Amino acid sequence: MTAGRLEAFSDGVLAIIITIMVLELKVPHGDSLAALRPILPTFLTYILSFTYIGIYWNNHHHLLKATKRVTARVMWSNLHLLFWLSLVPFATGWLGENHGAVWPTIFYGVILLFAAIAYTILQWSIVCQHGKDSKLAESFGTDLKGKISIGCYLAAIAAAPFEQWVSDALFVSVAILWFIPDKRLKKVVEEIEG
């Protein structure tokens, strides 16, 4: 299998995930701006989740562009990531409908945590086939952003029973951290594409 084929499959899955999330948004009853107030938590959660899916899509694209060949390990690692991302619409809906509740917040954080871990596994599966001395391996270095993200998700999960707004702030902070694609990986892709 080529990296392009794996990317096309993943793009399709991510497009379906976004479609499912938007279908969960309910049309407000009424024609005034006040009618939007009851669905505001759901809409804000949708925006955050859409941003996360977009971040994964963008970084996944760059990661696969830097991939020379796809092995069975890479394919399974990619499916592992897609599994956790496929749960984002459910977590988004539950959190949006029950904003401020402990368990939906914890569940949302767990899904984001495991998606981050799965992306790290995919990343290192690809790096392993290129070698530890490759430009791709050098581009990730110690993967500080990845470690910070996982730490923030763990803190958000731990904070949920006590201060739910702290969890929200941490979820938004990680999205802001990753909003601009990883320049190190982008540079490697540009060198590969020549």
Image (spheres, rainbow, N blue to C red):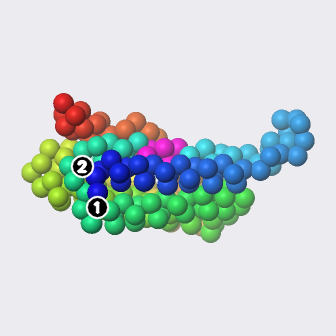
| Residue shown at 66% from the left, 48% from the top | 22
Q: What residue did someone put label 1 on?
A: 74
Q: Is residue 191 above or below residue 54?
A: above
The image shows residue 90 at horizontal and vertical percentages of: 62, 62
| Residue shown at 24% from the left, 62% from the top | 71
Q: In this image, 142 relative to 168: left or right? A: left
Q: Do callouts 2 and 1 mark residues in contact (Cβ within 8 Å)?
A: yes
Nearer the observer, 179 or 75: 75
| Residue shown at 29% from the left, 50% from the top | 3
Q: Is residue 17 above or below residue 187?
A: below
- The C terminus, quarter of image: top left
Q: Is residue 148 at all visible to an observer of this figure?
A: no
Q: Amino acid at mark 2?
A: Thr
Of all residues shown, which one is farthest toward the right? Answer: 30
Q: Amino acid at mark 1?
A: Val
Nearer the observer, 3 or 37: 3
Q: Is residue 68 at all visible to an observer of this figure?
A: yes
Q: Look at the image and give the residue range highlighted in magenta.
A: 51-57
The numbered dot on residue 42 is none
Label 2 neighbour load within 10 Å: few <14, some 14-19, many 20+ = many
| Residue shown at 89% from the left, 37% from the top | 31
Q: Secondary structure at mark 1?
A: helix
- The N terminus, quarter of image: bottom left
Q: What residue did someone put label 2 on?
A: 67
Q: Hey, which quadrant is residue 77 in on the image?
A: bottom left
- Marked residue nearer the N-terminal end (2 or 1): 2
> Which secondary structure dominates the residues rendered in magenta?
helix
